[in-house]
Amino acid sequence: MKRTQFSLGFIVRRSMVHRRVRSLAALLALTVSAAVATTLLTLYVSLNRQLHQQFRAFGANIVLTAPDGSTLPSETLATVRAIAGSESRIVPFAYAVAQTADGAPIVVAGTDFNAARAMDSWWQVSRWPNAAAATPGSPVAAMVGTRAQGFLHGDDFPLTYNGHTLALHTEATLRTGAAEDSRIFIPLAAFTAWTGQSASTLEIQAPGSAAQVEDLLHRLRAALPGVQVHAVRQLVESEGRIVDRTRSLMLSSLVLIALTVGICVLATLTASVLERRRDFAIMKALGSTQHQVALLFLLEAALLALAGAAAGYLLGSLCAFGIGAWNFHATIPPLWQAAPAVLLLNLFVALLAAGLPMRILRTMEPATLLRGE
Amino acid sequence: MATILQSAVGSEALIHLHGLTREYASRAGAVRALDQVTLTIERGEWVAVMGPSGSGKSTLVNILGCLDQPTHGSVRIAGTDVHQLSRQELDRFRAETIGFIFQQFHLIPYLTALENILLAQYFHSMTDEDEARRALASVGLGDRATHLPSQLSGGEQQRVCIARALINQPPILLADEPTGNLDAANQEIVQEHLRTLHRAGHTIVMVTHDPEMASLADRTVELHHGRIAAERRADLTAQK
């Protein structure tokens, strides 16, 4: 007696290969459903991060200022860094009103150019000055606001503060459309050495939701009782509102699209099972049990769901990556946690699509099916 | 299941139908395909069922093959009242007791000739490729084992169907118009196979329109409007 490898798996494989167009259509439907689910899930999960990143480009959402024209205690920056965490961006500012060679008053700000560049990426700067490249004895590199330029003569100019004159060189120009356009920015170390004043303001860009920013505010106020801590309300509240609404919109879209795709997959697979009702009846005539035939159809649906989930996950991750790069100019990595969810979703839809017609076929006599009814 | 088959050994008539009625619902009301049919078929007998289209021939064969359920009446096959069997028992009973030969052949299109026979073995118990090849050779298709149904002629497909019906050695063969779709040459081949099977002791119930095919049977039952209109033995004596 020669045993063969004849099994349900073998029959399923032959059936799928023989009906390759139908199988491919079903596989395509399941791949699309998995891809849509993966894309939406990945975008939904990363949306919070992406939107907050977008809002970070708008600048600080918390401002710390020293009371009544004084400066911040020297340990303030370290304290704020410890409380706000490494994810937060912090830029110190010190301000003084100096005089030009013509005796015109002008606001000079000392800051950390690298930190300001990271936080205020929306500022239009011709070329950010490099404070580290400054050489002793040479003019201090300055970033001059476009309106402030009108008070100066040439790129090299002196400014006087409390009788101390400082030689400066216009390294860059700045345009923000706001008060910064009337100011001259120089490195904080040079500012302190010139004016004897340290930072009076810290601008903080804290990540997270409105609630998280509020929480940080409370902690900063508690840790720095003598310092005024303000939220930039428009930014914090707008950010919270927009993030919440966008997430709701995404969730609604996810549910609607998943339902639509699910129904399409259901229709495709159901038709695929129903068109083989004659095979079902023949197998019944040959003595197969209900269980065996059901297993045959469910196995095929499960295999398609598995392959569709794998292909759809890759495709969906690619789509999410593309959307991230296109819309957010950010890298959205594959969401590994979405893989089991997408697989379960695909399996559920495929088994439902195969199971429903199986229930119908079970109630029909094989003779009826063989007649083609 | 063993008890189902064991009970068949001791019984006289292999098939006994009593007051068999089958109604189908339609828009115009209930359609009675079979109407109070009572029929007994002995072990080893070859019965031809004749009658015009719509007379209930195929319905009768489908009920005998447990592919359909009567609305009223009883069906006893091999001593078993099939109405009393659960779905699972009915599946098993069908695999053990009945072999089908269909007019439309009803081969699985994506399985080769050999695999179609293996499929019947698979649902019955376990596959044995050597035995399946022998069955295929016995119907003259030893060299067609790897051909798909679409690569076989109608006659060849019908012979595969016969080999498939016989592979599990069922006591009853049900043939619904076995030569209905065949040319004269293939019809002769199939007739010869059926004669051989009959000589080997198989019980055959065959639906046919063809008087020549019917003449091969021990007995002919004529159905009209779902009722038995006449029964004739091979000696042409009208019984009814």
Image (tube, rainbow, N blue to C red):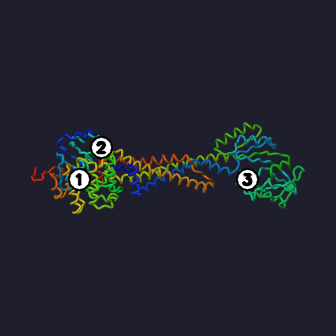
Which circle marks residue B92 in the picture? Answer: 2
Please tell me whether mark 3 or mark 1 is closer to you in this view.
1
Marks 3 and 1 on same chain: no
Residue at the far left in the pictured view: B237
Residue at the far front in the pictured view: A1
Q: Nearer the viewer, residue A234 or B57?
A: B57
Classify mark 2: residues with Cα within 10 Å, few (<14), some (14-19) or many (20+): many
Residue sitting at x 36%, y 44%? A291
Q: Tag 2's secondary structure?
A: helix
Q: Position of residue A36 (x, y in %)?
A: 51, 52
Judging by the rendered image, the residue that carries numbered circle 3 is A117
In primary-sequence order, the first of circles 1 and 2 is: 2
Classify mark 1: residues with Cα within 10 Å, few (<14), some (14-19) or many (20+): many
Q: Tag 3's secondary structure?
A: helix
C-alpha gap between disc 1 and disc 2 = 20 Å
Judging by the rendered image, the residue that carries numbered circle 1 is B175
Q: Position of residue B201 (x, y in %)?
A: 19, 49
Chain letter for the residue marked with disc 1 in the picture: B
Q: Are marks 3 and 2 in contact (CB under 8 Å)?
A: no
Marks 3 and 2 on same chain: no
Q: Tag 1's secondary structure?
A: strand
The three-letter amino acid code for the residue at tag 1 is Ala
Q: Position of residue A185 (x, y in %)?
A: 79, 53
The three-letter amino acid code for the residue at tag 3 is Arg
